[in-house]
Every structure is written in C-alpha cells, then in structure tokens.
Image: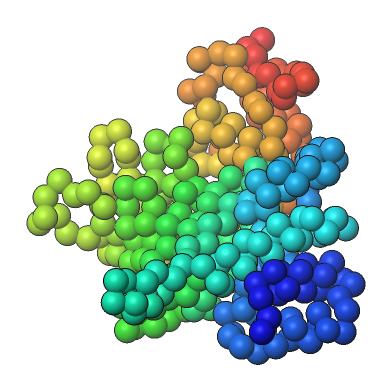
Amino acid sequence: MVNDTEILAAIASFLNGNPTVQERDLVVRWLEKDKQNKMLLDNLMNIFVPEAIDKEALDSKERIYLDIQERITATVPKKSINLWKYIAAASVIIAIIFGGVAVHKEKVPIVAVAQIQTLSPIGAKSIITLPDGSVVELNAGSELTYPAYFNGDIRKVSLRGEAYFEVSKDEKHPFIVEASDLAIKVLGTHFNIIAYDDDENIITTLLEGSISVRKTHPASDKEDAIILKPNQQLIYNRKDDSLNMKEVDSELYVLWKDGQYYFENEKFSDIVKKLERGFGVKITIGSAELETLAFSGVFPKNNRLEQILNAFKKHRNFDYKRTENGIIIFKK
C-alpha cells in the first residue's frame, strides 16, 4: 500500500520534471482516483518565484514553507526552483487530500472538508479555479479561502482584498462570497468585489447576471438584501454603516485584470494604496494636504510607477523621490 510520503515525493518529482517511471505511474493513478486531485495539481503547477524574493531566502526550508501558500496559483511566469519548494507545496496539497477526518466515539468517520487559503502576494495577480468550475482572479495583496470541494446546499468562499468572479451557474446551490461586513449571493454571474481590510469602503460591481448583497451583521432582521443589476455598483461605508448604489461602466472596474489602472475622482491616499499593492513598493505621502487631493485617469498596461506619478504631478504641486525604503511624495 502506498503511503502519503511516497505520494508526496512522487508529486514533488513530477512537478520538478524528473520523475522515475514508478513515480510517474503513481501520480497518474492518484489523478485517476479523484477529479479533485487534477484540479489541485493544476493549481500547484502555477507556483512561481517573483523577482522580489531574496535568493538566499529560497535556500531556507522555513522560508519556503512560509511562502508557498501565498504563491500556489499566481500567474506570473514560472522559474526553475529547487526541489524543497515543490515538496513544501506538495505538502500543502497532501494535507488537503488526506487531512480533515474526524472520528466520533461511535467510530463513525466524519469527513471535514479542508479549507484552502490562497494569497496573491503584493505585486502579483492570481487565477484560481474552484471545485465547481468557477474562476476567480485575485488582485495583488488579496486572499481567498474556499473548500477543497463543495458538499452542502451552498457554495461559500471568503475574500479579503479584491477579486473578479465568474461563477458557474447552479440554481440548486447558490454561491456566496463573504467579504468582511457583506455577503454577496449569486447563482451564476460575473462581478467584482473590493474589500481590503485597510479600505474605508467595500465596493461590489456587477458586470453580468444579478446578485443580492446584504450586511453580515444587519442592524435589524428586517433589513432587506439589495439586488444589483449589470452596470450597478454598491458601496458600503464601514465608518457610517451606509449603503449607496450608483450606475457605472462596470468594465472600467475590472481593467486591473489586464494590468491597467483606473481612477475616478479618488483620493490620492487611496490611489497610493492601489499602487503599493500593484507595484510592491512602499509609498509615503509626506503631506496631509496631498492625501486628500482627488485624481482621475486610466493608465495602460505596462506603465511604470514613475510614469503614473509623473502624470499626476503635472497637474498638482508635488514631487517624489526614491529611497532605500520606497518612494516619498512631498509638496513642492
């Protein structure tokens, strides 16, 4: 009988491109055993190493085990990495596959569905295929938690950060996204959610289909859910617990998927947060007055951070400089 360690080693060798005939056969049998295994392996094969990671850190097993969960499905080009990183990644998958079994006093096995937590690191985006075939694109600095498989009346996931969802339609099993103070319920549709912990607003934008949004902690049980139609956006303000609806061009709010930036009369402090996440650079605004300035604009793919800041400073009285710790913006 094959044990977990043998499967782990075979998966690691397979991913590293040098399996033996026996290891390859073992992986094939493992894939044929359960369709969920193929999905998990596909996600695992998307591991990458961004330029920002220090090379010395890659030689540390502890660092690898810490980073692997953050990088399991990110979509930047893969690089050659050592076997230990793949073993660490495979360990995560093996834990998901073989873990989560509890036994009651009556010795009846109860399977607890393992939760997968995927983090898209600062400076990168990720694509995740959920067990039901739904596709989620995570923006930089975002985290999605979802079950290894859906087994109840609902399909529920949790989001911190920003994500674009293309949900597979299943009328018998509604899809629910819990995003901090809001719960978004759908059957099958395309929508975008922004719910970073350090943002004042949670913003839900619908592109296709329909969704209902309600607070996870409503002031009253009689508080109704709000139904969104395509090109509608719901803004929940955490400070005053308010909900506001407006009509928008929804396509503009998912330009980030293609590496573009769209700002519509946004505070400079909020824009800086997005640039920090997208470029992986610490940006400090050295003036309270600058923080409240409002900017608008669309910046095409592959624009460098300096190009965006230079465009803004043409219309405002500020400048910036690079330091060892990032960028400092200051008033002229």
Image x and y of residue 104, in percent: 31, 71
Taking depth in this image into account, of 59 and 331 the one nearest to the observer is 59
- Locate residue 157 relative to residue 291 in the image: left or right: left
Q: Is residue 322 visible?
A: yes
When the figure is inspected, residue 67 is found, relative to residue 268, above or below; the finding is below
> Percent position (x, y) of residue 294?
51, 29
Q: In this orientation, which residue lies closer to the viewer: 301 or 97?
A: 97
Is there any visible trace of residue 295 in the rendered image? Answer: no
Q: How is the model colour-coded? A: rainbow
Please tell me which residue is depicted at 68% across the width and 49% down the height of the picture: 65
| Residue drawn at x 19%, y 49% as measured from the top left | 218
Residue 210's place in the image compared with 281, above or below, is: below
Horizontal relation, residue 125 to residue 26: left or right: left
Considering only vertical position in the picture, is 292 above or below 66? above
Quadrant of the rendering where the N terminus is positioned: bottom right
- Left or right of 185 on screen, residue 82: right
Percent across and percent down for residue 245 are 31, 52
Where residue 196 sits in the image (x, y, percent)? Answer: 47, 43
